[in-house]
Image (spheres, rainbow, N blue to C red):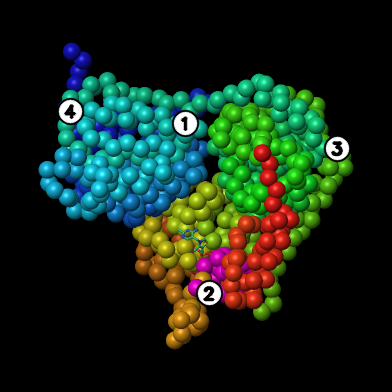
């Protein structure tokens, strides 16, 4: 008789997770070294009890908001290049559904997270339980909302189902193709139900993170397309970072002379400041990248989903441009009618570099790329200039922060003007990491994202660069930073509103409405003076050291002081509300109203239709 151990569902999960490891390129690490949780009646008696009794080797951290717990887990996974992640346990009902936004963010960004939401009773002896949504379909609960936002979903009705469910969840967590939210729903009663589990289920297990090899015939096809190109452009996406393919990318770009533009997730793919680095691509990109992209005859897309921000809603590339896409996911590899090279980015780049042989671009094209880059760098440098009569611009702020950042430091951001501004301005070479969540562009990722990065990398500064609107959405994570004494510096741009959306509104509607933080002045509109909030005081109240600055010099001083701190720091920067960075010069399909009594709306609609018909083109 094989040895058995009688354990509850929750105890099994806790014991099992502590024995799971991942391995890539010979480097082995714990797959799920920690768990975030907020307890309620849906998990305190189950996972809570199990963690208390059996969780010696899995670090429990108290969440402040279930959505944030998932963001932190996703950021941790990203910072470890998808070799490790964290679990999240919630109660049933609102605790569970609060995790849905985080799950969507993780799945869109292809980041593994393990979610363990409580669920309503499997036995149903109790009648409807507190927080239960009663549904015409008796086996449906609010947790079914996780289905469209996860890559793995299961509901455990019997403890022994874990024998198959947990290994499958681990497989998906460690799959480069399927990585995303893995959701194992745990009905409240089943968490406490016991079964005799084979002791061998708790033996150490190592999950290999594979590097699927590309098909040699596809590599030949891709190399032929490359050799025929006069004006190739390489787009580096998140897949380059996830696969740790920076070196292979540089080898190909340098040898063949292929300029490189980066997406939000791909920022930092070019590790050193080489001539072929054009910076961010598309809507929030640099003039250099976009100019070269507009004339490219071959687009080599590596590890990117090619979303509308990268392609300018299908307006950026020449009608006759050809695409070659290297991607571990076949769906992405086939986008834009590309020659699909399905495989690991690092292996595929290596194979393509070998197959490309002595191919190199012409001296004329090389000179053009250099000129575009030099011109952009001048524009970038001018963003540091003060503007008479105006407060500090976000350009000045970012350049001061970038200057203060050292090798090993990371800046995290997600929504508002910050991600686009950082894509454009942040120099991510020399190890100054730029962690942009722009797959979901989820306001509220910034602070927990910084927590996740901090937990993954004990060395170096971690900056969260965040808009005032986003800070107000979810400042509670500061309390967790104080509790865990996490050294994180939060830099808030206080521009008095949802200014990125106001900018869009002015471009597509022509009138401001509902985006600035202004007092109600009697009418239907929020047209009074800006609210006088003291975000620094709020941060102090949540356990951070806080500074308020109005100039780049003030920011530099505060950053120096924050570097000496051991816990959380918050620097509130007063910035000019309507001053934006130089435009990327790329069209975006956001349609003004088709009919309106307002002349400014009608003219914008007309312009939109003209632009759409002239600019949009499709590749298939
Ligand atoms: C959760 C969520 N809600 C709404 C949005 C839409 N949205 C994108 S940016 C933005 C405004 C952000 O304001 P703030 O953080 O102050 O940054 P700013 O635009 O001023 O730079 C909003 C509402 C979003 N991205 N995420
Ligand atoms: Mg703002």
N-terminal-most mark, 2 or 4: 4
Q: Looking at the image, which residue is at 55% across and 25% down?
A: 212
- SS state under label 4: strand
Is residue 473 left or right of 494 when viewed as pictured? left
Q: Earlier in the sequence, mark 3 or mark 4?
A: 4
**Residue at left 30%, top 49%?**
142
Q: CA distance from mark 3 to mark 4?
A: 69 Å
Write the residue at 64% across / 31% down: 340
Along the viewing direction, whichever of 130 and 347 lies nearer the viewer: 130
Whole-number angstrom distance, CA of label 1 to CA of label 3: 40 Å
Q: Earlier in the sequence, mark 1 or mark 4?
A: 1
Q: Earlier in the sequence, mark 1 or mark 2?
A: 1
Which is nearer the eye, 542 or 164? 164
The residue pinned by badge 1 equals 175
- Residue 136 in the figure: left or right of residue 75: left
Residue at x-position 64% and y-position 49%: 310
Q: Which of the 4 image quadrants contains residue 171?
A: top left
Mark 1 or mark 3: which comes first in sequence? 1
Q: Which residue is mark 2?
A: 513
Residue of label 3:
362
Q: Residue 67 in magenta?
A: no
């Amino acid at each position: 008789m094989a040895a058995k151990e009688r354990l509850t569902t929750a105890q099994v999960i806790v014991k099992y997770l502590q024995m799971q490891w991942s391995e890539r390129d010979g480097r082995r690490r714990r797959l799920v070294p920690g768990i975030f949780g907020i307890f309620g009646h849906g998990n305190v008696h189950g996972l809570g009890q199990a963690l208390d009794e059996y969780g010696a080797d899995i670090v429990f951290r108290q969440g402040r908001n279930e959505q944030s717990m998932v963001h932190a887990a996703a950021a941790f996974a990203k910072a470890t290049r998808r070799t490790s992640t964290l679990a999240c346990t919630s109660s049933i009902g609102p605790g569970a559904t609060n995790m849905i936004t985080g799950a969507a963010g993780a799945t869109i960004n292809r980041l593994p997270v393990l979610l363990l939401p409580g669920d309503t009773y499997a036995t149903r002896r109790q009648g409807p339980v507190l927080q239960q949504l009663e549904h015409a379909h008796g086996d449906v609960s609010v947790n079914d909302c996780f289905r469209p936002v996860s890559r793995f979903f299961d509901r455990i009705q019997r403890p022994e189902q874990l024998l198959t469910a947990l290994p499958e969840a681990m497989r998906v967590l460690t799959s480069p193709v399927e990585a995303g939210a893995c959701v194992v729903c745990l009905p409240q009663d089943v968490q406490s139900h016991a079964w005799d589990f084979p002791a061998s289920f708790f033996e150490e297990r190592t999950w290999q993170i594979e590097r699927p090899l590309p098909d040699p015939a596809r590599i030949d096809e891709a190399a032929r397309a490359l050799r025929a190109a006069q004006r190739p452009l390489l787009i580096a996406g998140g897949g380059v970072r996830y696969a740790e393919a920076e070196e292979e990318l540089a080898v190909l770009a340098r040898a063949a002379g292929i300029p490189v533009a980066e997406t939000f997730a791909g920022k930092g793919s070019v590790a050193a400041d080489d001539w072929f680095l054009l910076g961010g691509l598309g809507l929030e990109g640099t003039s250099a990248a976009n100019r070269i992209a507009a004339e490219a005859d071959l687009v080599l897309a590596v590890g990117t989903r090619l979303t509308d921000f990268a392609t300018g809603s299908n307006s950026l590339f020449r009608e006759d441009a050809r695409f070659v896409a290297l991607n571990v996911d076949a769906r992405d590899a086939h986008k834009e009618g590309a020659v699909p090279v399905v495989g690991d980015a690092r292996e595929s780049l290596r194979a393509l570099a070998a197959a490309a042989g002595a191919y190199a671009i012409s001296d004329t094209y090389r000179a053009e790329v250099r000129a575009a880059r030099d011109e952009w760098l001048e524009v970038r440098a001018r963003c540091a200039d003060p503007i008479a009569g105006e407060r500090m611009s976000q350009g000045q702020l970012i350049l001061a922060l970038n200057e203060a950042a050292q090798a090993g430091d990371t800046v995290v951001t997600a929504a508002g003007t910050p991600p686009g501004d950082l894509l454009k301005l942040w120099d991510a070479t020399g190890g100054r990491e730029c962690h942009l969540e722009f797959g979901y562009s989820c306001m509220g990722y910034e602070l927990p994202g910084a927590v996740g990065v901090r937990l993954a990398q004990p060395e170096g500064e971690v900056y969260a660069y965040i808009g005032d609107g986003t800070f107000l959405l979810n400042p509670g994570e500061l309390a967790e930073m104080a509790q865990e004494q996490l050294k994180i510096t939060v830099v808030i741009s206080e521009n008095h509103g949802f200014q990125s959306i106001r900018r869009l509104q002015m471009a597509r509607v022509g009138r401001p409405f509902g985006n600035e933080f202004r007092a109600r002045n009697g009418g239907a509109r929020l047209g009074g003076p800006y609210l006088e909030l003291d975000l620094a005081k709020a941060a102090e109240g949540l356990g951070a050291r806080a500074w308020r600055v109005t100039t780049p010099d003030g920011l530099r001083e505060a950053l120096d002081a924050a570097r000496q701190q051991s816990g959380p720091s918050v620097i509130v920067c007063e910035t000019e509300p309507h001053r934006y960075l130089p435009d990327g010069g790329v069209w975006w399909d956001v349609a003004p109203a088709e009919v309106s009594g307002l002349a400014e709306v009608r003219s914008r609609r007309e312009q939109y239709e003209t632009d759409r018909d002239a600019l949009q083109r499709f590749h298939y």
